[in-house]
Image (cartoon, rainbow, N blue to C red):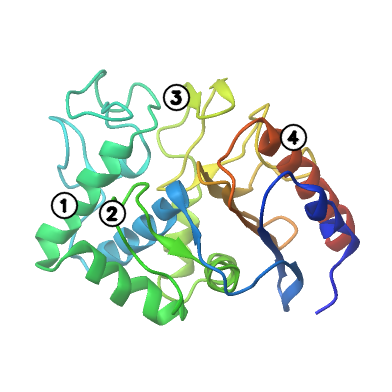
Amino acid sequence: MAVGTALDAVMDWPVGAAAVGVLGRDGVLARTGPSERSFRLASVTKVLTALATLVAVEEQTVGLDDAAGPPGATVRHLLAHASGLPFEGTEPVSAPGTRRIYSNTGFEVLAATVSERAGVDFEEYVREAVLRPVAMDGTTLAGSAAAGTTKSSLSDLLALAAELLEPTIVAPSTLHAAIEVAFPGLDGVLPGFGRQSPNDWGLGLELRGTKSPHWTGARNSPATFGHFGAAGTFLWVDPAVRLACVGLTDREFGAWAVQAWPRLADAVIDEFA
């Protein structure tokens, strides 16, 4: 497949290896880099955890308003980083629903809740609920359900992006609810980009909204959703233009990504929207 000019800039990224792809309503539009190489996902793992939880909600294994986590918190709070749990640690630092605190612990509690209710190991639940039906055969789950050592490939993440554009494992209405703001108006810190007011989040999926600065581009619509990881990986979907973009690298997130990713996003939208 030919590489679109929007992806030319990837060649200049200060990384050892990068794999980037663009997806539209008719499939993959452009890609560059090794399609089958495995890269660590870090917090992009949360997208898999969130989707598996949404499947569990549809199966009535758990309910979004079921109690989970700290007193007063629910599955919905955990998905939306509004449970009051800190980034790491089990002692709440605020009341549920009052602050947007990005929490790895919250997602680990979420995974444990689904696993207990389903009666199966959470990794197995994710494999059966998400990986197999989406044909993510090259993805290996390992470690934390929030940001462990799970690895995946460009091909697999493009398949995941296609699922987020046109859902098949959950009803479109379920995904639509997941990309609406949960607990509107909450302020908080977006890791790597500072305090945001508001710091909008859906159910496991970060929402661009009016955030600035942000890891997507200025040309992305406020409806853009997705996630990025400290391993130098990202996945965004912009439903307003029916485009998705996936990137995996072998360099940790840092100042280079803060500059490179928004520029890439703007170039992708300019070329393919």
Q: Are marks 4 and 2 in contact (CB under 8 Å)?
A: no
Ranked by sequence position, the earlier of labels 4 and 1 is 1
Q: Please name which of the two marks, 4 or 1, marks the residue nearer to the observer.
A: 4
Q: Nearer the viewer, residue 62 or 10?
A: 10
Q: Nearer the viewer, residue 195 or 261?
A: 261
Q: CA distance from mark 2 to mark 1?
A: 16 Å
Write down the residue under mark 2. Answer: 143
**In the rendered view, would you say 212 is above or below 204?**
above
- Asked where in the image residue 151 lies, by quadrant, the reply is bottom left
Mark 3 surroundings: few (<14), some (14-19) or many (≥20) residues within 10 A? some
Q: Please name which of the two marks, 3 or 1, marks the residue nearer to the observer.
A: 1
Report the quarter where the C terminus lies.
bottom right
Q: Are marks 2 and 3 in contact (CB under 8 Å)?
A: no
Q: Are marks 4 and 1 in contact (CB under 8 Å)?
A: no
Left or right, 181 with reference to 241: left
**In the rendered view, would you say 4 is above or below 231?**
below
Write down the residue under mark 4. Answer: 259
Ranked by sequence position, the earlier of labels 2 and 1 is 1
Mark 1 surroundings: few (<14), some (14-19) or many (≥20) residues within 10 A? many
Report the quarter where the N terminus lies.
bottom right
Where residue 206 appears, x then y in whole percent?
51, 43
Q: Please name which of the two marks, 2 or 3, marks the residue nearer to the observer.
A: 2
Write down the residue under mark 3. Answer: 186
Where residue 146 appears, x then y in whole percent?
34, 47
Residue at image location 78% in from the left, 53% down from the top: 10
Amino acid carrying label 2: it is: Gly
Q: Are marks 3 and 4 in contact (CB under 8 Å)?
A: no
Amino acid carrying label 1: it is: Thr
Amino acid carrying label 4: it is: Gln
Write down the residue under mark 1. Answer: 113
Q: CA distance from mark 4 to mark 1?
A: 38 Å
